[in-house]
Image: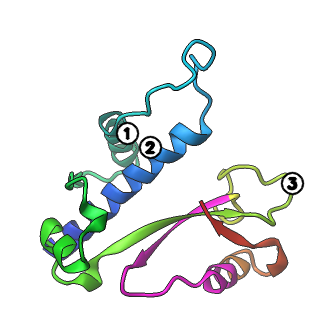
Amino acid sequence: MAETLAELERVQTQILERISKLEHTYLPQNDAVSAPHPEPISICDTEARLSNILQSNGVNEFLFKKVPADYYDCPLESRRDILGAASIDHLCKSIVLVNTQAQSNVVDCSDRNNSKYYVVVVQYTARFNAETVKNFLYTLNHAKIPKKKFNFTCI
């Protein structure tokens, strides 16, 4: 249980950071005319939104963990210690993918089987394989969407 909790903490922290960056980059800012460089959405705001999403989907046990600013400059062994993970094999990264070959009517994430964007969680000690993701989605869609309609680029 402790391993699972530590892994969840780490994944949530990474997802929070990436979501904040994506929101700041891609969501329209209400005051864009008067403030050409609006402040990014704070981690606290993101934590509150994610907490609400998790709770509304029945996830009642979770924990957000803040890490030092130089966390991503640290070796995996130090990251393991910071997060209290059992080993470096328990450390994962979240990769946000965009399907560059999605059909023109696929513009968001409303269909999880055929989305414009995906978040893939991969162990640091493993290699990410886009072909595996493509094959998974092809199978998930019962071969109704051709493999050539899945081509991924990291955001």
As measured in the structure, the alpha-carbon distance from the residue carrying label 1 to the one carrying label 2 is 7 Å
Q: At 69% across and 80% down in the image, what residue appears?
A: 134
What residue range appears in magenta? 117-136
Q: What residue did someone put label 2 on?
A: 20
As measured in the structure, the alpha-carbon distance from the residue carrying label 2 to the one carrying label 3 is 26 Å
**Residue type (three-letter) at the residue carrying disc 2:** Ser
Colour scheme shown: rainbow
**Residue type (three-letter) at the residue carrying disc 1:** Thr
Pick the residue in front: 135 or 60. 135
Give the quarter of the figure containing the N terminus.
Answer: bottom left
Q: Are marks 1 and 2 in contact (CB under 8 Å)?
A: yes
Quadrant of residue 20 in the image?
A: top left
Residue 148 visible somewhere in the drawing: yes
Give the quarter of the figure containing the C terminus.
Answer: bottom right
Other-residue count near label 2 (Cα within 10 Å), few / some / many at <14 / 14–19 / ≥20 = some
Residue 146 visible somewhere in the drawing: no
Q: Secondary structure at mark 1?
A: helix
Q: Nearer the viewer, mark 2 or mark 3?
A: 2
Q: What residue did someone put label 1 on?
A: 46
Q: What residue did someone put label 3 on?
A: 104
Quadrant of residue 30 in the image?
A: top right
